[in-house]
Amino acid sequence: METLLQNLALGFETALSLQNLAYAFIGCLLGTLIGVLPGLGPATTIAMLLPITYALPPVPALIMLAGIYYGSQYGGSTTAILVNLPGETSSVVTALDGYQMARKGRAGVALATAGISSFLAGCVATLALAAFAMPMAELAFKFGPAEYFSLMVLGLVGAVVLASGSLIKAIGMILLGLLLGLVGTDVNSGVARYSFDVPELTDGINLVAIAMGIFGFAEIINNVEQAEHRETFTERVGSLFPNREDFRRMLPAAARGTALGTVLGILPGGGSILSAFASYTLEKKISRRSEEFGKGAIEGVAGPEAANNAGAQTSFVPLLTLGLPSNVVMALMVGAMTIHNIQPGPQVMTSNPDLFWGLIVSMWIGNAMLIVLNLPLVGLWVKLLKVPYRYLYPAILVFCGIGVYSINNNVFDVFMAAGFGLVGYVFVRCGMEPAPLLLGLVLGPMMEENLRRALLLSRGDFSTLVTRPLSASLLAATVVMLLIVLLPAVKKSREEAFQEEAQA
């Protein structure tokens, strides 16, 4: 306990410096500003803004990226409530009742409920993150190459299970990501692989270029196709302060959502999405007013928003302690850490304690900033929603192009991003979620490296993956997860859940 308090003191000392406070504020502001635009979720926002952090020192860069992450999540909730256009999968649940509250003239209360629930959940989940971090890091030091390989297999299977749409399509996207991860120079032999004599590909495919393409460019192209005329309740935001009855119904739902999100957010494959759906299902089942759900129940906003935010915070646990990105945003965080010469994993706690604990404490500060920043500025976000798409998207495309070019000052990266933008658009039109592809691209080289190390230590014996207890347990969990999701009842429930998402 004493060690934890000392570490938190170091974190507060780091996060409360003027420089880091300023970057946390800028991250929250930029994240909300981009995230509030219809159709642009956290992954797209992070991909767009990632290049601006490269010139910063590592600690401010990651604090700013974390602020962008949960700022864009809050912005996604705003569009879900006011425009019924979720910026990300987990905001779909918020839209079900939040939009109906807006239709009844209670948009202000819905926005405040989302903000307050997210703040409370973020504070609790960050405390859980600090508590989980040290035991998880100690466990991670017991991992060898075989265990890391098995853990990454579990993470990829989790991404397949939690991806929306067809399981076959999700598996295909994972495999495509793994194949793209092979492009570059072989670390053992030094021979270029699949580079087709293109010098720019000898270092591998640029992570930011592909992320910007399949998330930024592709989403923009797809959104331009959508009908611009949507029923938007921007004139009747109303009072932002919930009444006593609202608080009586909101706080227990937020507490349950926080508990669910804190636990489920740690799971590989996108626990924040799972926790939001699980929270909504739980609230609907235990509520005495279940008939109100889908018609403007405040619990349907408070629970999923709390679960979503808690899951987003605790998704940092596997990244910071094991080096395993649990969702596409964490995969982009891996790219940012790698560019700053920081190897994600348990060694971050010992080699960069100011970064590790400063980032954790900055989440508390960032959540407080979001409340202070966003609720008074609801009017500004409302006005931004009135700007026609045709004016916003060209500016965003230009910004994305400049960002990609600024990484290596190379036009090739811009063309690559544009090419992957077209590919990503095809994926969207074919109902293939691109998030598993990016996870495969990030985890592929790490899986290959750890598998090679494991085989080198075992003299080529593949049985080392199942004879080591921890590795065998992780592979067994992977098989169990696959078997469960293939059960007819579970498969049907999964399809119904994602069908409800598509309809929302």
Image (cartoon, rainbow, N blue to C red):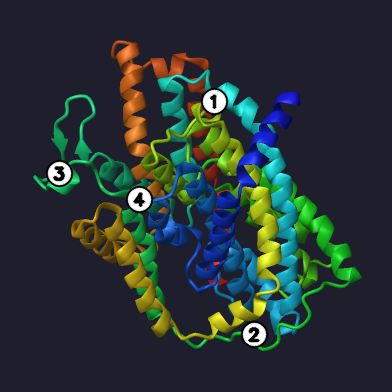
Q: Nearer the viewer, residue 327 or 487?
A: 327
Give the residue at the far left of this rendering: 197
For the residues labelled 2 and 4, say whether their Cβ atoms are less than 8 Å apart: no
Label 2 amino acid?
Answer: Phe
Residue corresponding to mark 1: 350
Image quarter hosting the C terminus: bottom right
Label 3 amino acid?
Answer: Ser
Tell me the tag on residue 195: 3
Please tell me whether mark 3 sits on a helix, a strand or a loop: loop
Tell me the tag on residue 311: none
Q: Residues within 10 Å of mark 2 (few under 14, many from 20)?
A: some
Res 58 seen here: yes
- Give the left or right position of residue 82, taking residue 107 as reference: left
> Could you tell which of marks 3 and 1 lies nearer the N-terminus?
3
Q: Nearer the viewer, residue 401 or 466?
A: 401
Label 4 amino acid?
Answer: Met
Residue 94 sits above or below residue 406 on the image: below
> Could you tell which of marks 2 and 3 lies nearer the N-terminus?
3
For the residues labelled 2 and 3, say whether their Cβ atoms are less than 8 Å apart: no
Residue 447 sits in which quadrant?
A: top left
Please tell me whether mark 2 sits on a helix, a strand or a loop: loop
Label 1 amino acid?
Answer: Thr
Image quarter hosting the N terminus: top right
Instruction: Measure the alpha-carbon separation of dots 1 and 2.
Output: 50 Å
Residue 420: image x %, image y %?
Answer: 27, 60
